[in-house]
Image: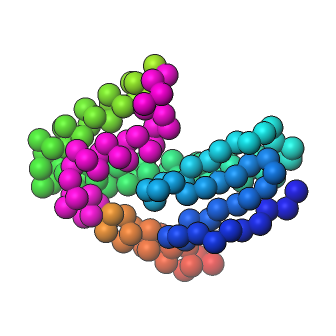
Amino acid sequence: QKFTKLPTNDNIPTFSATTIAMVQAPNPVMTVHVIEDYTTSEEKRVVCTMTQKRRRDFCIFMKILMKHLEIVDPALREQAKSLVKECTKQNRKGNPEYTPLIETLEIRLEECVGDEHWRHAKAYMNEYTTMVRKSRQIRR
């Protein structure tokens, strides 16, 4: 099967195939939907790679957010940590309101910390990804 690239917003790649479809949710979070069993290892690798990248990027973002909160508002950091712990616990119990975990955490954390702290963490994340991209280019 060949994958066709569909137009996307925010440079988040979206692929279309008979066995998988990746769509962008209303918020800037990528959601992966499995339509039927994988027919090739290539398709499975695309799904795994995209979800692993999303999970890795969100973990990095959470670390940046927590470090920012540690500096500017330690009490809010503890509140955010408790929220992450509760969401993770509920997700592991199988509560459908907490699935998928990354999207749930993103929505609830943004509500918890507020727009100002969220924007600061996003700006730090953009600086970090730019720095990583530049360092990869230098290595080549």
Q: Residue at x 70, y 42 (%)?
A: 34
Name the spot of residue 46 as percent of width and height, x first: 72, 53
Horizontal side, residue 81 vs residue 92: left or right: left
Q: Quadrant of residue 116?
A: bottom left
Instruction: Report the front residue among 133 and 116.
Output: 116
Q: Quadrant of the C terminus?
A: bottom right
Most extreme residue toward the top, as rendered? 93
Horizontal side, residue 99 vs residue 46: left or right: left
Name the spot of residue 95 as percent of width and height, x first: 45, 23
Q: Residue at x 44, y 45 (%)?
A: 103
Q: Quadrant of the N terminus?
A: bottom right
Q: Residue at x 22, y 44 (%)?
A: 112
Horizontal side, residue 80 vs residue 42: left or right: left
Name the spot of residue 62 as percent of width and height, x first: 35, 49
Most extreme residue toward the front, as rendered? 26
The region drawn magenta spans 94-121
Q: Residue at x 81, y 42 (%)?
A: 38
Name the spot of residue 117 as percent of width and height, x first: 21, 58
